[in-house]
Amino acid sequence: MYRHVFDAKLNLLIGYPKSDTCSTYNSGKNTIEHKENCSIEFEFQKVDRQKPITDNNMWYITMDLQQTMPLPKLLASRAFYLRQVWLYNFGIHCITLSGSKSYFFTWTEDLADRGSTEIASCLFRFCKLLKEEYLQINHLIIFIWSDSCSGQNKNFIIVGLYQYLILNGYFKIIEHKFPEEDYSYLYSDRDILNIEKR
């Protein structure tokens, strides 16, 4: 009955929500240039993703900060507007010769904010974890893909972290790439989407 009303009477379609859709494409401005840019971005990502599959000295990671989540998760509208604690979740998806794995770093607003310092702390902890796992490997090359949010990924604190990692022998080369807006479709985004669907 419910579906019949939407389909027949209101002419509304019920379907799965789309994730990581392109705002340029959704606005109807899907020009040839836009499609070419999208294809180029995917090719660059594909090339970087394939490198660690053939070389144990390379890692490919994507990273993203999930939209803040309220704790506790309440559905009642009155309870939702009461004061809640916000949870931050920073996701990293790593591809190495040994496979693909997701890492999540979570904290609440009472412990820390969600700025560049916190992102750098998560990224440093991640590098320490993987360096311990791959002790025998030296002079690693890492390819990092993330959105270009200047408050989190594109700033001097992250650059300072990269300098520290190189000077202390974690990596030989760090390449951090920022895809154009709407062209990312990164693995870390997909990991976060899987969390949000639950």
Image (cartoon, rainbow, N blue to C red):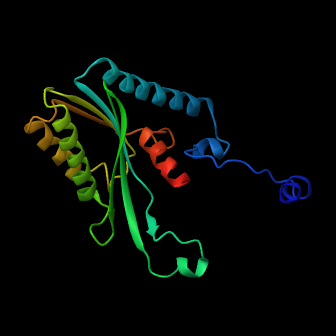
Count of all numbered marks drawn on residues in the image? 0
Instruction: Residue at 12% x, 43% y: name it.
Output: 164
Q: Say if 127 sits above or below 42 in the image.
A: below
Location of residue 58 in the rendering, given as x and y in whole percent from the top left corner: 26, 26
Location of residue 81 in the rendering, given as x and y in whole percent from the top left corner: 52, 80
Front-most of residues 20 and 159: 20
Location of residue 77 in the rendering, given as x and y in whole percent from the top left corner: 60, 77
Instruction: Residue at 14% x, 40% y: name it.
Output: 165
Location of residue 115 in the rendering, given as x and y in whole percent from the top left corner: 30, 60
Instruction: Residue at 28% x, 30% y: name it.
Output: 59
Q: Say if 84 sits above or below 171 in the image.
A: below
| Location of residue 107 (image quadrant) | bottom left
Q: Quadrant of the C terminus?
A: bottom right
Front-most of residues 30 and 153: 153
| Location of residue 145 (image quadrant) | top left
Q: Say if 67 sits above or below 169 in the image.
A: below
Instruction: Residue at 31% x, 26% y: name it.
Output: 98
Q: Say if 188 sits above or below 82 in the image.
A: above
Q: Is residue 155 left or right of residue 178?
A: left
User: Seen from this angle, which residue lies furthest left?
Assistant: 168
User: Seen from this angle, which residue lies furthest top?
Assistant: 54
Q: Quadrant of the N terminus?
A: bottom right
